Amino acid sequence: MDNKRKTIFLVDDEVTNLAIGKNALSGTYNVFTLNSGKVFLSLLDDLVPDLVLLDIKMPEMDGFEVIKRIKASERTKNIPVILLTALDDEEAELKGLSLGAVDFIPKPFSPALLLKHIEIHLLMEAQKQELEAQKKELQGFNENLFHMVADKTKSVVELKNALISTMAELVEHRDGITGGHIERTQNYIKILMTAIIAEGLYPEDTQGLDMEMLLQSSQLHDVGKIAISDSVLFKQDKLTPEEFDEMKKHTTYGEKVILGLKSKTLDTDFLEYARVFAVTHP
């Protein structure tokens, strides 16, 4: 048997049809002729053909029953099956197609017509397999792309969080605050927001709230202090009323800083949380 050639199973109980079919196909394909549906099914355990030519009207087991069994097996369900019939019966053709046949060829068949039908369906099957392979390749590419994007997104988020934390720490240290003021603020906000949600308060404002984003944004609540003069920010003595008024302006300064950031980025939800913290905290 030539392994480079496609393999065809011709199943028919009439010896004449088997001989005509074998003579017509042997020059192009590896051809196995079988005179029984049962024998054919038993041979499938050892060899899966590229296409089956199957007579409908056979003793013991007709072609309809044979095709049912072919399509019921995961191993053989994709084999193209062309039914051979001497019947001029629309109902039989409809039944065969419903069971999974790809075509009908009337008997007695023309060798040239038989070859052309087989050529067309083998080409269609090859194209189908190629499309399936491309689909799997594309799925693999999409999965790799998804993981790459996810990894890159994770890196960007981690970088953003690191920058925010560093900025907040710089502000905290500039103000001379010690003892983890930002971390305590986050903990208090988390406790407060968890209780508000549990009690069902302000449902319109808390629905769909991203707690992680909220807590991260709270780190920027004092960012406006970078605009306060050193003489006021670092003053050891009690602030004058004017200096105290200046210190209170760090909330509006913070809002301006964050609004400036909002105009340069798409991450507006995060910065809106930060803006609210900056402008409304005492």
Image: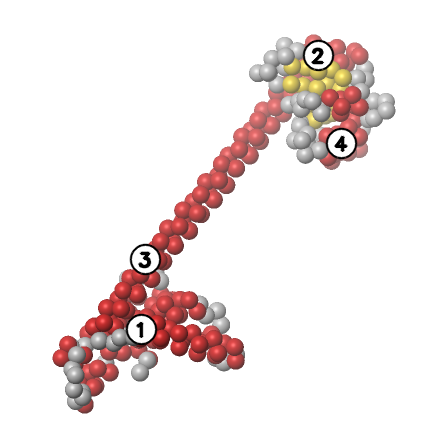
Pointer 2: what residue? 22
Please name the residue shown 39% across and 74% down the image.
187
| SS for dot 2 | helix
Pointer 3: what residue? 159
- As drawn, the residue found furthest toward the left would be 231
Disc 2 residue type? Lys
Nearer the observer, 122 or 276? 276
Labels 1 and 4: the sequence-earlier one? 4
Disc 1 residue type? Gly
- As drawn, the residue found furthest toward the front would be 179
Pointer 1: what residue? 180
Disc 3 residue type? Leu
Q: Nearer the viewer, mark 4 or mark 3?
A: 3
The CA distance from mark 1 to mark 4 is: 73 Å
Labels 4 and 2: the sequence-earlier one? 2
| SS for dot 3 | helix
The CA distance from mark 2 to mark 1 is: 88 Å
The CA distance from mark 4 to mark 3 is: 59 Å
Labels 4 and 3: the sequence-earlier one? 4
Quarter where residue 220 is shown: bottom left
The CA distance from mark 3 to mark 2 is: 71 Å
Nearer the observer, 27 or 146? 146
The CA distance from mark 4 to mark 2 is: 24 Å
Asked whether, in this view, residue 269 is left or right of residue 121, the answer is left
Q: Nearer the viewer, mark 2 or mark 1?
A: 1
Nearer the observer, 221 or 272? 221
